[in-house]
Amino acid sequence: MGQESALVQLKQIFIGRPIPSELAHHERLSKTTGLAVLSSDALSSVAYATEEVLRVLVLGGVAATALVTPISAVIAVLLVVVALSYRQTIMAYPAGGGAYIVAKENLGTMYGLVAAASLLVDYILTVAVSVAAGVAALTSAVPRLHDLRVELGLAFVLILMLGNLRGIRESGLIFAAPTYFFIVTLMVLVVVGAFRFFTGAVPPAPEAAVASGGAGVGALGAFLILRAFANGCTAMTGVEAVSNGVPAFKPPEAKNAASTLATMAVLAVTMFMGITLLAHAYHIMPVDNETVVSQLARAVFGGRGAPYYLVQVATMLILVLAANTAYADFPRLASIVARDRFLPRQFMNQGDRLAFSNGIVALSGVAAVLLLVFRGDTHALIPLYMIGVFVSFTLSQSGMVLKWKREATRGWQGHAIFNAVGALLSAIVLVVVAVTKFMEGAWVIVAIIPLLVIWARAVFHHYQKVAEQLSLEDYRPEDLRRNTVVVPVGGIHRAVVEALRYATTLSKDVRAVYVDIDPVATAHTRRAWEQWGQGVPLIVLESPYRSLMEPLLDYIEKVDDERPDDFVTVLLPEFVPRRWWHHLLHNQSALLIKAALLFKRHTVVTSVPFHLKA
Amino acid sequence: MGQESALVQLKQIFIGRPIPSELAHHERLSKTTGLAVLSSDALSSVAYATEEVLRVLVLGGVAATALVTPISAVIAVLLVVVALSYRQTIMAYPAGGGAYIVAKENLGTMYGLVAAASLLVDYILTVAVSVAAGVAALTSAVPRLHDLRVELGLAFVLILMLGNLRGIRESGLIFAAPTYFFIVTLMVLVVVGAFRFFTGAVPPAPEAAVASGGAGVGALGAFLILRAFANGCTAMTGVEAVSNGVPAFKPPEAKNAASTLATMAVLAVTMFMGITLLAHAYHIMPVDNETVVSQLARAVFGGRGAPYYLVQVATMLILVLAANTAYADFPRLASIVARDRFLPRQFMNQGDRLAFSNGIVALSGVAAVLLLVFRGDTHALIPLYMIGVFVSFTLSQSGMVLKWKREATRGWQGHAIFNAVGALLSAIVLVVVAVTKFMEGAWVIVAIIPLLVIWARAVFHHYQKVAEQLSLEDYRPEDLRRNTVVVPVGGIHRAVVEALRYATTLSKDVRAVYVDIDPVATAHTRRAWEQWGQGVPLIVLESPYRSLMEPLLDYIEKVDDERPDDFVTVLLPEFVPRRWWHHLLHNQSALLIKAALLFKRHTVVTSVPFHLKA
């Protein structure tokens, strides 16, 4: 028992004390904390969206980067439209309308599963991308950490995992602080940057940029512009978060959520456009070792002073916070999907935090693998990111259109048009992303989502078959009243005696079975049996082929045939050693016997533990 | 049961039918078959020993390779001395005198374990080296297979493993044929080669060799000569095989074995020196893609004709056969050592062929890893090979010296001197090998042997402690007469009903335990219980923290406290699915409960299988 309580202690240190049921829903979100908690994902993408556009445009020449402004403007408009579209979802689903629920209810289970698969993939990539971008903010400020970026990313994931296993939900403050810190520092950056630009303090573009300018724009292909646009659409990720979290708001929930969404959209558009315009005004070009935001902050604040470091710290913190939101979303969605039997029940929440722990560990594991494979490079991860996001956007908005149409309340057409525009634009972005990013890695996600759906259906099918087999309808239990206990023994010692004593409590019909492969040993065992046999008859089996297993299995078969209305219990002494590697030194034959009898009806194999002290 | 008989069938196909005890010892070896069976290891090393000497000498310049003859002559003398030394072992240990037994009996357990560890390592390397050399013989004849040598090596190991699991002991012929085939073709090669040399048919050495000649020998360091010598000592590996196999001979066993050993030594020396002298006479230089024997056969037989291919096939076959001897030796030694409790009992032979199968699989696995790591290169494996061989030689011969001295029969001094010379020379070779090959890989073996010995002692210590705890001396079994059966249920369905019915056969005191985390579900379960509860009382536990495990464990603790003289049996329904991955979808809580109760005294956790149809 010493080990057990140590386990409980360890669990409490890392995972935290269990939460009593009554306290689970005690904290409701105000608009202020709601914004902080639910918008970190959407706002944090501002930290890398402009850069992702520039990284593609620069391939068309320095002058082509001027297109960053119109492209970003289009994305900003899209963001507003999608946000308005989601506002409708909030109103229609005050109990929380994630894409899985909306799509399942309105488009059918299949689309629901596609949405769920997309979202689960999306959450994993939120962790990977946000952590990678957070590390980039850090290594931009402290360049000598650049070579450690993979290790730093893994460390962040580990901290997030342990923190979430421990349960970091004590206070809204931990979320509110970094979000508002980021909003304030970024706004200061934009305002100061704009002021210095308009007061003429910005140096003119470098010679090289001007020189190569003319040809660049002309040569830029439409495909490159679409690729740049697709990259920039990362700015739209996270817009859906508020609509998932409606029930967490203080009443009136839907109204509070809707106004939070509006604030978030305004902030995201302002910051995104601000950074984009300034990056262009300050002639910032993407480089490998420093983010665009870091370069911009250096340019605006005149080098690496305190204001610069504040921007970097704020950026890093909100990105880690954005990753953290996935740690709430992934286990929650997995739990909902598992309740519908489309995922293993290990993800289903049934008391404790075990199910959520499984989700947290799964999420961390896959995100860590992604960071390793893509060497912690935000830019390399982006092509994988957006497929899942825009599949779920499209399905969710399409589902809303059908919902309005089906319910046909007064003025439904107006609502439907909003959502239809949202769905259409999301679908267009999805196609653009899938086509332009396919070869860069999007194909992985395009392939994985259907595989996940197929697997989810196989899981469902299995659980359904099991439920049928477990059904009590028309069931009449077999009338098995007795139990023949067979104890295979290889000799006589304390563990055997203890197993025999246990056996005699189970049944009046206990038989010890010994396989004779050495007459001397057999004679010895027979003699010892008289003293130690606990009154159990010793049955000695011949083994012409010196096999231990076959005579035993034949005997069990014979017992079963003799007494078709009996259970047969095969009782094996099992050594429980103190050290893990000692397991390798014992119990092999017990495993073989269990494996051999696993599929035999009315046969139960039981291990009687014998606890070794060393 | 369908699956079980399929398992038995599969086992019979791959592993063969079990051998009745009476037939186990029916085949005794004549001198002719004895030579074939026991000498393949020793004779086959002729295929690469000369080349290994040349590969080092050539580093000192082409002319330095002239030293191959004197070095080989020294090795040949050593081989004869060691063989004579082993002849004494045969006479003294007619029951079979492997290095483990001789060292343990005469030098003590510790030295016995060092010998055993060395031999087990040696057997593994016999497989790796022989297979690598066999593949080299093949790829020399068919150069376009050269790039596939790792795959070919792994394929050979796989064939050897399956063949040995199947049991290839039907006939001595399978061993006799390749050995005599090799002896005959190699002798023909030597005789024809010598004839052509003496009749002046050999072209003079190439210009380059002559030109660089003068300086080469002089510049050659003593260290290089020692390295070359150490490499050549591979010719001595396998000399001990006959002394291990004495009891397998027809009576008079010792006499037949001794004369077989003498024949083998003569053949090995003749072939080794023949190839060495001819390689020198024919100006053969080691190259990467073709073995020395292959080059020599081409030179002697004038190109790749039938005689050339016969040599290559014979060489390949005897090398595979040599690898095969390790498949008999490794499991046998492991079984002997396991009987002394220094290895896990899984290696101990107790009927069936299971123990030998474990040995065969372990041997194949490690040998395959070596082939992979060393890219199937004989030359790279050689430095690892000889440490184990010469440690066991030295210990075995030293043990014999002490045996003669202890027994002090008439004329023991003469015997002792023979063995003392053998021991001394083996020890010298061991030191030379260890020093000159240390950095090339011998350090691995120098490190592994002590680690294996430490582990073997830990295993022994553990088994001894277990034996003490199992001893019936002064043992009085506790008087536990009753059994309280606790059945944790999460609801009511067929599997639960079947488990309850089984439970009622075990005890009059059965209690079903249900943890209340949802009042609606609890009420539902209570209602269904009236119809389906099988008369077992349903105990509903409160769970303020929504935990399932803790209330259950607390309850079991309480039952145990109430009835200190009872066993407590915790009965869990367990789903047995048809497909392996379905396991992931079930039984997680059963595992947790088992883990939590594993160390609890008088508590037995039993799974009642419920067989799923899909």
Image (spheres, coloured by chain):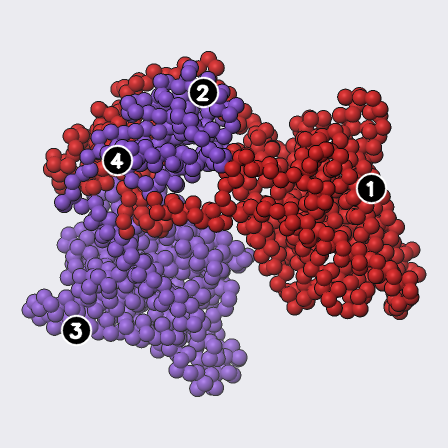
Chain colours: A red, B purple
The label nearer to you, 1 versus 3, is: 1
In the image, what residue type sits under mark 4? Pro
The label nearer to you, 1 versus 4, is: 4
Pointer 4 and pointer 3: residues touching (CB < 8 Å)? no
Q: Circle 4 is placed at which residue position?
A: B564
Chain letter for mark 3: B
Give the Cα separation between the discs numbered 2 and 3.
89 Å
In the image, what residue type sits under mark 1? Val
Q: Circle 1 is placed at which residue position?
A: A80
- Mark 3 is surrounded, within 10 Å at the Cα level, by few (under 14), some (14 to 19) or many (20 or more) other residues, namely some
- Mark 4 is surrounded, within 10 Å at the Cα level, by few (under 14), some (14 to 19) or many (20 or more) other residues, namely few
Pointer 1 and pointer 2: residues touching (CB < 8 Å)? no
Give the Cα separation between the discs numbered 1 and 2.
53 Å
Pointer 1 and pointer 4: residues touching (CB < 8 Å)? no
N-term-proximal mark, 2 vs 3:
3
Question: Is B549 situated left or right of B253 in this image?
Answer: right
Q: Circle 2 is placed at which residue position?
A: B526
Residue B395 spot, x, y in % from top left = 24, 67
Question: Is A29 situated left or right of A436 in this image?
Answer: left
Residue B187 spot, x, y in % from top left = 35, 63
Q: Circle 3 is placed at which residue position?
A: B417
Pointer 1 and pointer 3: residues touching (CB < 8 Å)? no
Tell me where residue A293 sits by quadrant. Answer: bottom right
* Above or below, B178 relative to B599: below
N-term-proximal mark, 2 vs 4:
2
N-term-proximal mark, 4 vs 3:
3
